[in-house]
Amino acid sequence: MDFDHDIIVIGGGPSGSTFARYCAGAGMDVLVIDKRKEIGIPVRCGEGLGAREVVAQGLELPKRCISTEILGAKVYAPNGKAIEWKDKTTSGWVLERKMFDKWLCELAVDKGAKVHTYTRALGLVKEDGNIVGVRLSHGGRDPYEVRAPLIVSAEGMESFMAREAGFKTVHSLYDVDTCYQYEMKPYDHENLIELYFGNDIAERGYVWIFPKSDRKANVGIGIGGNLTRWKKNGVDGADPKVLLDSFIANNEKLRDSSTLLDFGGVISVGAPINEFVKDNFMVIGTAAKQVDPIHGGGIALAMETAALAASVVIEAHKKKDYSRASLLPYEKKWKDTLGKKMAKRLLLRKVMEKLNDDDLNYIFKTITDKDLNDTMDGKFAGPVAKVVAGRPQLLKVLSALIS
Amino acid sequence: MITIKHDGCIFCVGCSSVCPKNAIEAVGTRMEHYPERCIDCGLCAKVCPANVITLHKGVKDVSQLKTQNPELETQR
């Protein structure tokens, strides 16, 4: 059978570009298509990224991709009490995401991948029941077919091709947060990520302030997508902007600041999809719902997953075998490593949404910055013991974390 | 069916990510709605962070909608 490429990657975000970089680097013929006019735009993101993933992949972020470095975090209880922790070194960055995505994509091009923007996948091409390519359209013009023995969905939240291939990528309202964010200036910050919890502030979620360069900050909110206490147009639903505006109006440092950018989005905070591979098809990154359920961050997991998936595909390519069985190690390895970490975070999210403001205030009064760090690392036993000792009624809820 | 007020849409694709029927899709520079697939579930309107989606329950096509709500014409 004649193929145009070894792999077609749908989506030029962090997962698609990273995957393409590794596969092209191993000598494979990779086509990346992205339906956006320009890679990286529009930005739909809080733009935070931990240092670890970038270092692990031997990359050095160019200055243009970094807005500012993050030195730690400050987490606020509903009553305003804060726990702060600082690292001695840079723990991460707030990115200029549009520059970052484009840079990652260019790295793939440098390794030999071919990228086409403004190119939308209209459907999968099948022969004898097997997926053999995709039908594409450039800028809405006449459709054409491109063929490859492996199609990779790195489509992000929309994931239409993954759906067509039979993956359950549609999100339930319970498993998403709906978010609104402004880039604001001036906001004098200490290069810390600030998080504000409380049911009045952000029901089933939180307000974040991510520091950026030049006295700027991303000020955003995420709340449960299944909330229904706002009258919207013909439905009762969740309206994060209303809460965010009220947070800003009540915050002395932000009340009079300007907004430089509005954006919002719906982020995945649930479990990953059950399976990632089928014959001639795989799903990576946010399309596979590989997103941190606590903070909704997808870049780090996307990059780690892409590297893992690429290592499996490079082996499959050597055997010219793109069957489900041949691709399955990606799914298995993911579930044994990144999946385990993600499962712990999901558990923590589900426990946290059962806590009321009094509980949260008590927890913040009781635990230290180290406890908070341990909790974020999935080491729950110490912090839970401390909290339950003084507030035994929380045992039932918190015991889920240590069973 | 639903209508999307494109003036105000922040193009976040949130609606599309929760649509169980693939009835909303980002195409070019805006969100496209396919009324023939829409089942009036309203999930898109519930999560829309920009609050630009209106659910018109029981309304099946645009012509019917325009007859009932002439002012909506500008929103499509």
Image: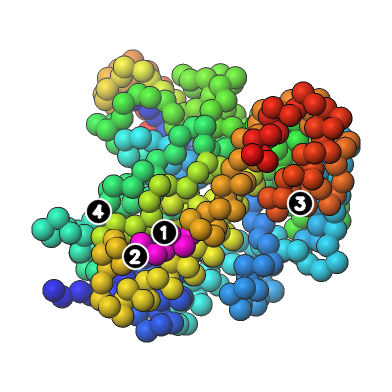
C-alpha distance separating marks 2 and 3: 34 Å
Return the residue at label 1: A331
Residue type for callout 2: Leu
Mark 1 belongs to chain: A
Residue designated by label 2: A327
Mark 1 residue crowding within 10 angstroms, few (<14) / some (14–19) / many (20+): many
Colouring used for the render = rainbow
Q: Which residue is mark 3?
A: A374
Where disc 4 sits, the SS reads strand
Q: Is residue A285 above or below residue A274?
A: below
| Label whose residue precedes the other's in the sequence (4 or 2) | 4
The part of the image, by quadrant, that contains residue B15 is top left
Q: Are marks 4 and 2 on the same chain?
A: yes
- Circles 2 and 3: CB atoms closer than 8 Å: no
Question: Quarter of the image containing the N terminus of chain A?
Answer: bottom left
Q: Is residue A275 visible?
A: yes
Q: Are marks 2 and 1 in contact (CB under 8 Å)?
A: yes
Q: Where does the image place residue B44, in percent across and percent down from the top left?
A: 44, 32
Q: Please name the residue shown 49% across and 70% down the image.
A: A307
Q: Earlier in the sequence, mark 1 or mark 4?
A: 4
Q: Amino acid at mark 1?
A: Glu
* Foreground of the two, A88 or A46: A88
Query: Residue at point 85% right, 49% down?
Result: A369
Give the mark, 3 or 1, whose residue is nearer the N terminus: 1
Per the rendered image, the range of residues in magenta is A327-334
The span from disc 2 to disc 1 (Cα, nearest Å) is 8 Å
Where residue A183 sits in the image (x, y, percent)?
69, 49
